[in-house]
Image (cartoon, rainbow, N blue to C red):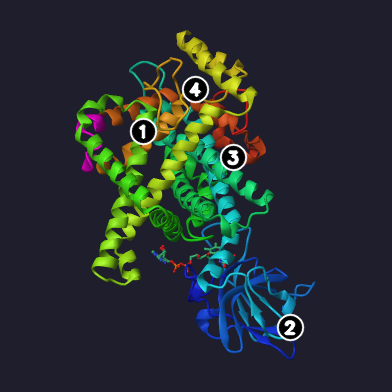
Amino acid sequence: MTERGHGSNVKRIQTEATFDLSAQEFVIHTPCEDAVKMYIGNAMHGNYAAVFAQLIVDGRSQGPHCFIVPVRDESGSLYPGVTAIDMMYKEGLHGVDNGILIFDKVRIPRDNLLDKFGSLAPGGQYYSPIEDKSARFNAILAALTPSRLAVTFQAMGAMKLGLTIAIRYSHSRRQFGPKAEEEVKIIAHQTQSLRLMPHLATTLALTFASRYAGGLLDEDIFQGKELVDSRPLQALVAGLKAYSTWENIRCLQDCRECTGGMGYMMENRISGLKCDTDVFVTFEGDNVVMLQVVVRELLAQYTKQCQERPLASWLRSWAESGGDNLRTSFLAFTANTVGALTFLLKAVNFRERVLQRGLVARIYYKVVTKKEDFFGAWNSCLHHVASLSLAHVHRVTLEQFYLAARRCPEPEHRALLMKFGKERDRLERLPQKNKEKDTEADPSAFCRLHINKSSSPVEGDKLTPGASSKEETGQFCLLYGTKLVFQERAWYLEHKYLTPAASTRIRSQLLDLCDSVKDDALRVISAFNIPHAFLHAPIAGIANPRATWAFYPAPLRPKPAAKL
Ligand SMILES: Cc1cc2nc3c(=O)[nH]c(=O)nc-3n(C[C@H](O)[C@H](O)[C@H](O)COP(=O)(O)OP(=O)(O)OC[C@H]3O[C@@H](n4cnc5c(N)ncnc54)[C@H](O)[C@@H]3O)c2cc1C
């Protein structure tokens, strides 16, 4: 797909596939230097390439289409007209070569056009079920949705691995401590849990949100629904891809720093993971471009609603806006609820709503009132676009985390979660020195996801961090929501959704939660069920004869209780 001249802007690629009627063939050609295919995975060894090119019939381009082009024979020799150049060393992903492909009038049969969205009759008549060229192009690109979701899962895999290594090491490495006493585990340093626990909560949240997206994708496939008809799903996956891959980079950097010099050693995996996954933010669609996919869909839905039911939409928007104004006028009375998950769910909903209203108003003013061209208007709002897009993904992710914790579909897991809720209370009453032993023997090792009885994500009971009541919900879920609001506290203060006092409480809540879940974190990473053979980092307690100097005994070994 990618060319030297065009990466994100695939529509403008220049490789040509010209139909030769008499030979019933396409001629694949690279017309200029900007049209050479770049970064192509497996370009140095593959036998076939799926090449995106402008389909040209009778001198007219029908837009980018995909063609299967044989590039090498069985013995690995390039076919005439194909040139492949290795792009050499990269930051990571050394197991795959990436190269340049150049085509000099390479002929392929007419059948090699992947013709789901555009076909060519033997007589040269072009037919597409989608008349509009832009819509057709979007339909072709919709095929990237599953691989974008796959990148999200890969990013989560790297986060789970990095966190497992960093958390295990943090529970066995000791530095500093009270005078004349044993030094404390480094996880006991406040900044250590503050750097690692929010990433763990985010990883859990992303796990549930991605499973939700995967479930929707499965449903569509089983029902024979075309991906092109699931625009909201395409947008959700684009947003999750951007969010998860950025979170992965931040998470691995913190894991690296939290494991000190040991984390920098290749034997301990984290630096390799960082190098391999850095590019996730760029390939399968640059993240900033992905954020725009999300917002285009949000605005399309908004416009559709307004066109279909103008009065109802106007009334709803008016009511929401009035409600938001009221809410922000009486903040002082709600400040004490920041510990409630419902408050956090409402806060992320509020942020998304306000950002969306603001963006619609901005674009309307520029395009309709000031008659600016759409590209210029959109470009001058990109910062807001990116904020809205992430706010949307944050909201969906928190809601999915909440719903997953509440529903917990499998009775066995639900029982484990409930049991762990009770188990924790019992453990807290035990003397400190017995705790680890007891935890090791606990077969219900899982994570602290207490179940909320409320039925709606934004309505329910107030929660207090660490409270042990029947209204408890997941501490990690609460931590994730707290992190989301904490990281945007300047915005919430600007919009008077938080008072300075509430903002201070959010900070204390974040610190308290990070501290309270730091021991449970061992159970959560154990529930990731990463086999030792894949973990193989000596600082995570996996001995390696090549690097005995890096070995740290595993802090504890709870039996894996469930998979996350
Ligand atoms: C290791 C690796 C493997 C790859 N494998 C393949 C492969 O197998 N096949 C393939 O076809 N491609 C592959 N790619 C290419 C990859 O998909 C592109 O690099 C990616 O789409 C970005 O394109 P670009 O590099 O041209 O960056 P550009 O599109 O030039 O982007 C550069 C910068 O400009 C910004 N930008 C661009 N457009 C906008 C916009 N509209 N709004 C705001 N900002 C914008 C981006 O955010 C980015 O920061 C691979 C790349 C790498 C590094």
Disc 1 crowd, CA 10 A, few/some/many (<14, 14-19, 20+): many
Q: Using the rendered view, name the quadrant where residue 485 is placed.
A: top left
Q: CA distance from mark 4 to mark 3?
A: 41 Å
Magenta stretch encompasses residue 503 = yes
Residue 384 to residue 195: above or below: below
Magenta stretch encompasses residue 124 = no
Q: Do the numbered discs 2 and 3 sit on residues whose CB atoms are within 8 Å?
A: no
Q: CA distance from mark 2 to mark 1?
A: 60 Å
Tell me the element at label 3. helix
At 56% from the left and 25% from the top, the residue drawn is: 446
Q: Earlier in the sequence, mark 1 or mark 3?
A: 1
Closer to the camera in the image, 138 or 29: 138
The type of residue carrying mark 1 is: Leu
Q: Badge 3 is on which residue?
A: 547
Q: Which residues are magenta?
A: 493-504
Q: CA distance from mark 4 to mark 2?
A: 63 Å
The type of residue carrying mark 4 is: His
Disc 4 crowd, CA 10 A, few/some/many (<14, 14-19, 20+): many
Disc 2 crowd, CA 10 A, few/some/many (<14, 14-19, 20+): few
Marking on residue 344? 1
- Residue 160 screen position, x and y as percent: 54, 39
Q: Badge 2 is on which residue?
A: 122
At 49% from the left and 50% from the top, the residue drawn is: 236
Closer to the camera in the image, 4 or 243: 243
Disc number lying in front (2 or 3) = 2
- Specify the quadrant that holds the N terminus: bottom right
Q: Do the numbered discs 4 and 1 sit on residues whose CB atoms are within 8 Å?
A: no
Q: CA distance from mark 1 to mark 3?
A: 45 Å
Q: Using the rendered view, name the quadrant where residue 84 is placed.
A: bottom right
Q: Do the numbered discs 1 and 3 sit on residues whose CB atoms are within 8 Å?
A: no
Q: Earlier in the sequence, mark 4 or mark 1?
A: 1
Q: Earlier in the sequence, mark 4 or mark 3?
A: 4
